[in-house]
Every structure is written in structure tokens, then in C-alpha cells.
Amino acid sequence: MAAPASTSIPVAHRLRDAGIAGLVAMALAVPFLGLRTVNLDQGLVVQANLAYVPLAGAVVFLGRLVLGLLAAPLAKAVAPLAAWRPPAAAQRLRAWGGPLLVLAAVALPFLPFANRYVIDLGTTALIYILLATGLNITVGLAGLLDLGFAAFYAIGAYTCALTTTQLHWGFWPALVAGGLASSLFAVLLSLPILRLRGDYLAIVTLGFGEITRIVILNWQGLTGGPNGVSGIARPTLFGLTFDRRAPAGGHTFSEVTGIAYAPEHRLIFLYLVILALTALAAYTVARLRRLPIGRAWEALREDEIACRSLGINPTMVKVSAYASGALMGGLAGCFFAARQGFVSPESFGFMESATILAIVVLGGMGSQAGVIIAALFIVVLPELARGFADYRMLAFGLAMILIMIWKPGGLLSGRLPTIRLSNAKPKSVAEAA
Amino acid sequence: MAGPLLQLSDVHASYGPVHALRGVNITVNEGEIVTLIGANGAGKSTLLMTICGNPKPTQGQILFQDKSLVGIPPHLIATQGIAQVPEGRRIFPRMTVLENLQLGATLADPAHFAEDLATCYGLFPILEKRQAQRAGTLSGGEQQMLAISRALMSRPRMLLLDEPSLGLAPLIIRQIFQVIEQLNRERGMTILLVEQNAYHALKLAHRAYVLASGEVVLTGSGRELLANEQVRAAYLEGGAH
């Protein structure tokens, strides 16, 4: 099919359009730029500085004009991008994608360019992938919006922090406890919100996120309030620590293996542990999707009434989706606590919930590969833009807008079917086109 | 024919302040096709939904296989052997046709899956061709076929169909009704059918009830009602294809 000839809009029309935009900008510039409060001896004084007004008008006029003239060629240039599909060979690669990705991730800390910074960044990215994998169950698969996911992250982190510092547990039992505690809270939370949907669900989960943070902040006796908890146990390898000197009665990794002590060892170990945990989580979710419980999650997202008519109990499906998502959130929180050695309520604000949700939405709801790509994007991009300092959130926002324009369903919006019969011939892309 | 499979006696139900059913008595015998016709808002869909537990009847008794359905939570109705094809089809649009059918078999013995799947594909061959396709990309008629097949995957004793002809082309409606009849004739499936399309429904049904303002106002065999002056005037004028 031939592309429709782009209708060219006359330049006069463009000029008028830009003129109107310029006038609107000037009108807005009067209060925003033209008037300014200045702190003088006699108090706050409003000063008029109308020189900015025509300037703002001119900038918007030119900008609008250039954008208008460039819109058509730009759209044309971008069109093939949006229609791009991976070639058939790449699709065959898909089956190997997971293992290959894990292998590459395992190799990362041993590559020549891997320094502390790269490994640390990788660990952060993996924590976010684990968090988003959890939230992806709740939001992407079961379709239950959760704006307070950081609460489960926080509960996992604080459980780990408190069990290791107060009860002197090791990291591993604390990890299990963190995941379970988070999951338990999710079950408790899900009971009152079973009947809520959409906006109401969003508000209640948002509230739960904030309540959790505020309780942690104010429960000084248990959580240390704004001071946080420090001295959290580090992960050990079968009882071996990664310290320079062995604790009383213990051994260090370097003593036993004979490898010279290096502070990076602990970082690499942490990285590998979270990598294993995340890979396991991703694999588990992929398996769960093919089991009745996973199918029920997706069916619930599609149509709750139909689910009920087929004998699926929506209550159980919702509770299990919240609990499984929170379990992974709790594990990630525990890991975060052990890596930092310190937790405070600041780390679990609404921005954290929003970031995790952004990863899920950006990746394409329900897509595991999408979650990985989006998490890398969200963690690594601001780091790359460090040079811009103040502008990096701006660049980040712009990148998000561009993705939403080109790929409104998320980076990987396609959904992989969970069942394929042997006699069903999967249509190749070429055949379908 | 065998005795009553489903029996509703003096069933009342409300939607909030709206008293939608006012003492309905209906019997469906084993192996029958029974249809409910009536105008918009007569309470037809409410009646089906009340059987399925939502809303709960405020008064009266619903017996299925001599066991009361009153108070059974909606998601457990299906375990009793009642399969519903809800109004508006309600297929799972982003899942494939095959996944939809698999979800229909949630309560069934997995050992029957292949056999039941073959049965559905036999009834609606188009579904086999479309099995790897997302259900939301099917045409309206195909979605209705999928909704019926999905309900059949649970091996029900009885099928409740809510407006299967809604929004479909006449040719497709004819095909759907043929399958409903075939299910009944060949497999002895008991069917309770709610329809606006009174002509097709009455032609098909062994017995029928006419519902108005939440009450049964007329009952008889499909043929009788088809010939009834009142029914012709109220529900059939211009309705026949």
C-alpha cells in the first residue's frame, strides 16, 4: 500500500499558528517572567521586568514555526522505526535470549572495564529489575494497579535490617524473613481492597505506601525513625565473610580460597547473588504464567466477571498476585539493605513506587524482557546524563515522552502466548504480512 | 423427558432499590431448550445472573439437581455444573483463542482437555484456524463462538446463554442458533437461553417464558408462543428474518 501523499499545509497557515502560540506565550510570560518579587529592606516588592515578555513570544514563535515545518519530515523519518519488527532470525534468538543475557551479566564484573562503579550500577539495575519483576505480577499480569509498591520494598528492607541488628540473624535467614514479611503485609493489605478497582485501588495503594513510610519514620523505638538502621549484616558465602579480617571464630573468603583480599570481592559477590536471585525470579514468573495460577492472573486482568463464571475465585487470584509481587519486592528490599548496610525511610518514598511502576509500564505491561530493558534504561540513563547534572531529570522525562509517542504500549508490548499446541503452526512474520 | 434440572420458585431479586424480579417461577427439565424472552429491562438478564449468585435472591428458592443454589458464591456456581455465556461475550481479549479455551477448562479434568477441545473445534471449525490468534482480534460472531466453546470446556450439565445474538449479522446468528440446537439434539445439553431475538429463540425452544416487569406473564411451548397474538404484536413484528 502506498503511503498517502503528505498534505502540505501552506506556510501562511503555519505563520498564523506560530503567531498565535507566540501571543499565548507572551500573555503567560507577563505573570511568569515579567513580574518578579524582590526582597528589599521594606519587604517583598513586585518588580516589573517586561523585557522578557517579547523575548518569550519570539522564542515560542520561532520554535513553533520550526516544529511545524519539521513535523512532516520528522514523522516520515520516524515511521519505519515504529513499524520495525525484529527479523525472523532474531525471533529464533528469543528462546536463547534469557540464558544469553544471564551469561553476559555473569561475565560483566570480570570484564576489563568493570570497576567498582560499573558493578555497583549493575547491582542497582538488578535490584530494580527484581522490584519491577514483582510489580509486573501485580500490575502487568493481574492488572491490579499498585502505586505503593515501595511499601513492600521498605518492609523487606526493614525486616532484614532489624532481624540482623536486633536479633543478630545472618543475612540469609533475614532474606527469607524479609520476603515473607513483605508477602504477609501484602495479604493483609489485599483483603480490604479486594472490591476496589481502577482509580480507587490506585488511591488506596498510594495511601498504603505513604502510611508504611510514615509509620517507619515515626516508630522511633523500633526503626530508629529518620536516623534509620545501620550495621546491617552483609551476605556471606557459606559462612565466609568478605571482610579484610575474619570476625571472631569465622573465616574470610580470601583466607579460605587463597585469593588476595580485595574490597571489590564483596561487590562482585553481592552482584552475583542478586543476579542469581533476579534470574530465579524471572524464571519463576515465566513458569508461573504457564500454570493455572498465572493464567488466572491474566484472565483476571482481562475480565473479572468472566473469571467468576468459569469458576476462578477472584479473591484468591488477587491475594496471590499481591503476595507474589510483594515477595519479590521484599527480597529486593532485603538485598538493598544488605548492600547499603544502612536503611532510612527516605529510600522508600513515592518516587520509588513511581519509578518501579514506570519500569513496568515502559517495558510493556507483563513483559519480562521489557522490564529488563526498561530497568536498564531507567537506571543507566540518568547515570549517563550525569554530565548534565541539573538537566538529567529533564532529559529523562523527554526520553519517556518520546517512548510513549513511538511505542505507546511500552518497549515490548507483544504478549507471548503461554500455550502452543504441537499441531498449531506458528505463523511466520512474512506469512502474516 | 427427565424431571426438572433447574427449578426457580417465587424468586425475588433487587438491584439496589430496583426490584428487578418479582416472584418468578421457572422450570427447566433435563435435555430441554428453554428460552426467556421479553423487552429491555424485563429482568431476563437479572434472572440469569441471580441463578449465578449475583445478585442474591431476596426471597424464593433456586434448585439445581435438587440442591439449593441460594447462597453459593458466584465463582462456585460453575462447580455445580452450570456454565454461563455472559452477555457481551466477555472473552479474554489479549489472550489467544486457545488460552481462552484453556481457562474455560479451569474446573475440568485435564485428561479431557484434548477431547473437549476437539469437540469445540468440531462445532466451530473457524476457532481451530484462529487458535493462536488474540481473541480480541476475532470478529463479533467468532467471539460469540469462542464464548460458547469456552463455557462448554467445563463439561457443564447446563448452559446459560445471555443474548448470544447481540450485535451479530443475521447469517452469523443463524449459525450460532444452529449450533445451540445441535448441542441439544446431539449431546442432550440442557439450555436456558435469554434472547431479544424472539423469533429465532422461539423457533428453537421446546418451551418459553415471556417476562415483563420482573414477572412471568406468559408461558408455553415455543410453537405456541410463536403463534400467540400477544407475543406476535409485542415481540415479533419486524423481528423475523
Image (cartoon, coloured by chain):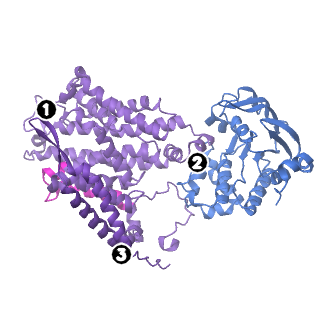
Chain colours: A purple, B blue
Can see residue A284?
A: yes
Observer-side mark, 2 or 1, equals: 2
- Determine the residue positioned at 58% across, 56% down: B98
Front in this rendered view, residue A180 or A4: A4
Residue A319 horizontal/vertical position (percent): 47, 35
Specify the amino acid type for callout 1: Gly
Front in this rendered view, residue A393 or B131: A393
Q: Which residues are magenta?
A: A95-120
Q: Which residue does the numbered mark 2 point to in the structure image?
A: B103
Question: Could you say whether the residue bearing mark 1 is in a helix, strand or loop?
Answer: loop
For the residues bearing labels 1 and 3, Cβ distance under 8 angstroms: no
* Residue B230 sits above or below residue A63 on the image: above
Q: CA distance from mark 2 to mark 1?
A: 54 Å
Q: Which residue does the numbered mark 3 point to in the structure image?
A: A11
Residue A204 horizontal/vertical position (percent): 42, 34
Q: Is residue A409 left or right of residue B117?
A: left
Residue B194: quadrant of the picture: top right
Q: Which residue does the numbered mark 1 point to in the structure image?
A: A250
